[in-house]
Image (cartoon, coloured by chain):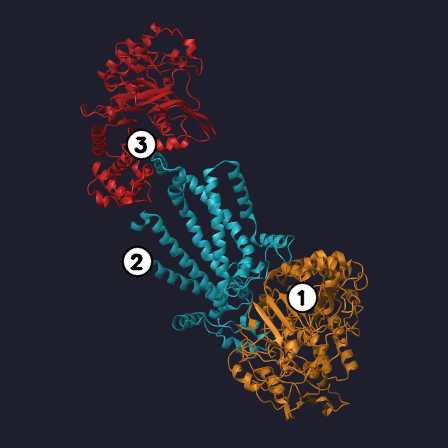
Amino acid sequence: MATYIARRVLWGIVLIILVSALTFLFFDILPSADPAVLRAGRNSSPATIAHIRQELGLNRPVYTQFFSYMKNIILHFNFGYSFYSGAPVLGLIKDRLPATLSLTVGAAVIWLLMGIPVGIISAIKRGSILDRVSMGVALVFVSMPVFWLGLVVLFLFAKDIGRFHVFLGANTYVGLTSNPARWFGSLLLPWFVLAATSAAIYSRVLRGSLIEAMGEDYIRTARAKGLRERRVIWRHGVRSAITPVLTIFGLDVGALLGGAVITETVFNIPGIGRLNYTAIVQSDFPIVQGTVILAALFIVIANIIVDISYAYLDPRVRYS
Amino acid sequence: MSDPLFSVEDLRVSFHTDDGVVHAVDGISYTVQAGKTLGIVGESGSGKTVSSLTALGLTRSRRSQIEGRIMFDSQDMVTLEDDQLRQVRGNDMAMIFQDPLSALHPFYKVGSQLVEAMQAHRSLSRSAAKARAVELLDLVGIPDPKRRVVQYPHEFSGGMRQRAMIAMALANEPKLLIADEPTTALDVTVQAQILALLEDLQKRLGMAIIIITHDLGVVAEIADDIAVMYAGRIVERGSADEIFHHPQHPYTWGLLTSIPRLDNPRDEELVPIAGRPPSLINRPSGCHFHPRCPYVQEAHKRVDPRLEAVEGDGGSHVSACLLKTNVRTQIWEGLEAGREPESLQRMASASVGALAPPADASHLNLHGELESDAQLPGEEVQS
Amino acid sequence: MRGSRNLIALAVTLLLAAGISACGGSSSSSSSSSGGGSATTSSGVKAPPLKPGESINGQQLLGKKKGGTLTVLSNGDFEHLDPGSAYYALDYGIIQATARPLFSYPPNSATTLRPDLATTIPTTANGGITDGGKTITVHIRSGVRFSPPVNRAVTSKDVAFALERGANPNVGNAYWPAYFGAGSPAPLVGSTSASYKGGPLKGIETPNNTTLVFHLTKPGAAVFISALSLPLSAPLPKEFVGPLDKHAPTTYGTTYLVSTGPYMIQANSKGKIQGIGYQPGKSETLVRNPNWNAKTDFRPAYLNEIKFSIGGDATVIGQQVLKGQSSVQLDTVENSIVKQAYQQYPSQINFTPGSGDHYLTLDTQHGVFKNVNIRRAMWAALDRMAIVKARGGLLVATPGTHFIYPGVNGFDQAGGAAGPQVDFNKNVNGDLAVAAKYMKAAGYPSGKYTGKETTLIVVGSGGNGPAIAQIVNNAATAIGLHAKVSLVDQSVMYSKYCGVPKQEIDACPTAGWIRDFADPLSVLYAPFYGPAIVPTNNSNWSQQNDPAINKAMAKAALINDPAAHAQAWANIDKMLVDQAVAVPEDFDSEANIFSKNVAPVNMAWNEGLFDFSFTSLK
């Protein structure tokens, strides 16, 4: 197991370096705006631009830029500085991470709490009104754009601009440590919005896999043993059916930790997603690169965790 | 004869599917005495497994319809409350399944699956249950049970898995063990070991066994009685001796001639039954076996045979065939002597003139009508 | 996002798509609609609503109540808080409240300078302009002090230092070359040397702590004095800023900042703002500058605190401002919100005309548009009214007819709203007959282009870019051109295509220009002065290089009499129209929304953004 994990971690590191290299390459090849021009201001003299380009190291060959970037990360854990604000990228990321973390973890809890029971009930009561209604609702949520859903819930339920003044609305986020109650309140709507689609997807996936699992021979065995139905469903059915859900859960959480741009924008939560998005718009490459590495890191970690959980859940994996 | 431990009376099980109503079990009756072994034989789709699953209440669903009675320990398993039924399952009546790899949960250790079976029915401390699990594995002949008990099913060989299944079924010392194709997934040597084990356990524990199989050879050694099922019905039933020595139904003949036998010359080919089992949604008219019966006559396509006592045998030997008894005896003897199939078929058609429609043929065509017969309880034929 | 001071993404600036045009009607521009917000004074008297096209000069300075916190919501963030590099409308919102240049425009005047840090406006009469317009003497006020941790009094040396660092590449000031350095019509003495990278300059003398003497190489005093209204002239303490400027880019403005205005960015005891009052992409907080002395300033500074919250969706922000309390939206108001506010909250929206213009640049050096008559035909064919509608209708735009736009000196002399009376300019809905006439004159007897060349049109893809691309494409096709339209990101459009002459982009329809100050030079010089063409980051997208026009510009830049100066530039405007170096699309007006209890004061000289040193709560 240890060597397995070590192998996965090594591969993850290689992957992250590869992703970084690709980001450099894309930034170099694709017709993005010239960061030196943007930084210099739009009527700057060519001399100023040339100077800035040199100071930012943009006139060096792309591989040299890449190597010095990697060197700085490995030797000094320095991810560079924003072309615009001059702020250290690592500091910006540290500053934004709590919001993204709050958003992701809360949403994940909600979508699991919503998606899993609905999926199970739908699978068990397959074909019932309950099943049809919940799968219908799920389909609606799956096809609803997050952006639109976000606006709808704000215009319906936000205290400031909603029709019903229920929840804290956009731009109310504060850090957990500064005011836990407000942190929680401000995140309720975004959590719901972010969770809605996932809950719908999870309930549908779980329903499908549980229906399949409940048709397996070992379920018949479990029933033949005289186990209570609840135990049959949870210990024998759900336990097997949960693995595909786990896979998408790992990927989803990994990806969300890389930033949920739309939700962060609609609710104005200062997270990684918005940092990344703004940086892309501004061609603020160091931030783009930093957030890309972060996202890749999260996805790699999530994958490793998923793999380890697999081994935990399914003993057959451990030995193969 | 004492009251049977287990008796099935005119059991009908049908499933509503998108394609139509599947008549999986269509009015079957049989009994099993305590400590005895019944073999239920038939091809897949003959309804043999469904009937046993129904006994355990495992075919109950919104889409299934179950009629008739299944008496076990003076309780009707058809009408029993779910929870009471659950208490019988795995306790007094246990079942083992065909493919032990898929029938055991891949994620749990064999021991914990055994413990779970015990704890479902009795309060037992964890350690006591574990000790008993080791005991059970030992009982079914798994070497080094202490090590094996903490292993996962995929670490077991096929034969060992089936032994583990059996151990699990025996956990609560059932009065009736239903073994559904217990040896099909296993190779020949292991098959014999498992059968020997079942026989041995029966002797030691005194339980009744129902063995469900498509292979008459499997039950040859251990079954006391045999019921042959075809298309949801019992087409012939009798003691093992009667079935093997005076088989009455062309389907039984087919099953018998397809048993690989050690005393057969190697070059003699096995004779499988031609054709495929019929659809249980749109069943053939008349005798359901007629599309595949080598001795079919025109009338057989219209008249639905009923189970009738075989002349000359004890009343327990019944079969549902429209051929006359003496013709059947001649054909079977011909088959045993290895005569040409064509000549046997001629023999059947020669007798057709002699075959008058049964006196109550019109009655037989009435659907669903039961006929009570004091001498042959529960053995009905209907169209 | 608001436009930057110059060649920008004005398509993005005015994101107002179709919808709103119904409000403005289609008949006439300025008088047909009674649009605009009316604000209420603290005494309850309704201020007259500003109508589209109406001059904001003379806007009532509302509000007298002191105190309170204003929340400023903005989708986009500031770019630079350092007055040395700020060159973006949004940034000016903070600069106006924190930094004191030598001269300023009060919020209710787009054209009249007033002294800010300086005591008076230098004129020949008061002895401030001497040597025929080559020497300018400026006296600064005493009693102005830097915010903590610097705390000391401002001297003339601090102004000199601030100006000189404009040439420092680590600061990256965008307009130093154009108004003070080598690219200027009248450079400061010593600034034209290629090796000059900031530091003491011969052309700037500080004979004492309150006096500055500027020496120009040419008599360009008028423009030079106007240029001293730019943030670059706001004083900075060398002992504090100098070490920070050694970083490339400087960390002054991103990590540290000191202030001379009534407000300062919240900072720690060392003057560090980053992570405190400045959280890039998240928030900025302005608090009172304890060292500010109201007696030295014309700014009333009613508010106690101004909190900027960055990010969020524009429609949500709009709702929050309209339904909420004590808040305003800083960047461009969403089209749907303008419409909603105009109909449901008329007292919570106002419009500031003269916020900029848009035009379609035509490459005069390459391709089909080398031919002046094809350029005129393109002008005639373009449906400018359709573009106005695409930009949001007559509330926020009127058809462009020439290049000096409303609110800039010389606008009336150059033709006013109707523009020069040339036939290709007459019909704002496009006139294909006139277009055909010019195509014939260009040598295409059929009235349509019959050549093989492709006309490359590059458009910023944001906002209404695609709609405008379509309208321009229609015009080009109508005169027979083989148009090929490319939609790219706005920043890519200018930094990789339209601003790079060798790309030979034939037409760029999402160009715009915003004055740096009220002088017409700041509207015409950079985008059309031939000798200023550079290989990258070029501003003269039309590559206008007509010797007569270039000569007239160089000459007009040095005319110091205000009336003659304005007239000279109006004449240049007419020459540009005659040569059809670009096709004016529209003159813009900016919509601003604010909460019920906000008494807004907007900067007429800066795209109508809120002046936070004048705005108050009711």
- Rendering colour (chain C): orange
Q: Position of residue C165 (x, y in %)?
A: 58, 83
The residue mark sitting in front, 2 or 3, is 3
- Rendering colour (chain B): red
| Residue marked by disc 1 | C326
| Residue marked by disc 2 | A2
Tag of residue A49: none
| Residue marked by disc 3 | B94
Measure how far apart labels 3 and 1 are at the Cα level.
76 Å
Amino acid type, label 2:
Ala
Q: How packed is label 2: few (under 14 Cα within 10 Å), some, or many (20 or more)? A: few
- Which residue, as the protein is rendered here, is positioned at the far bottom? C207
The reply to whether label 2 and label 3 mark residues of one chain is no
Per the image, label 3 sits on a secondary structure element best described as: strand
- Image quarter for residue B244? top left
Chain of the residue on which disc 1 is drawn: C
Residue C479 in view, yes or no? no
Residue A288 in view, yes or no? yes
Measure how far apart labels 1 and 2 are at the Cα level.
59 Å
Q: Position of residue C105 (x, y in %)?
A: 72, 78
Which of the image's four quarters has the C terminus of chain B? top left
- Rendering colour (chain A): cyan
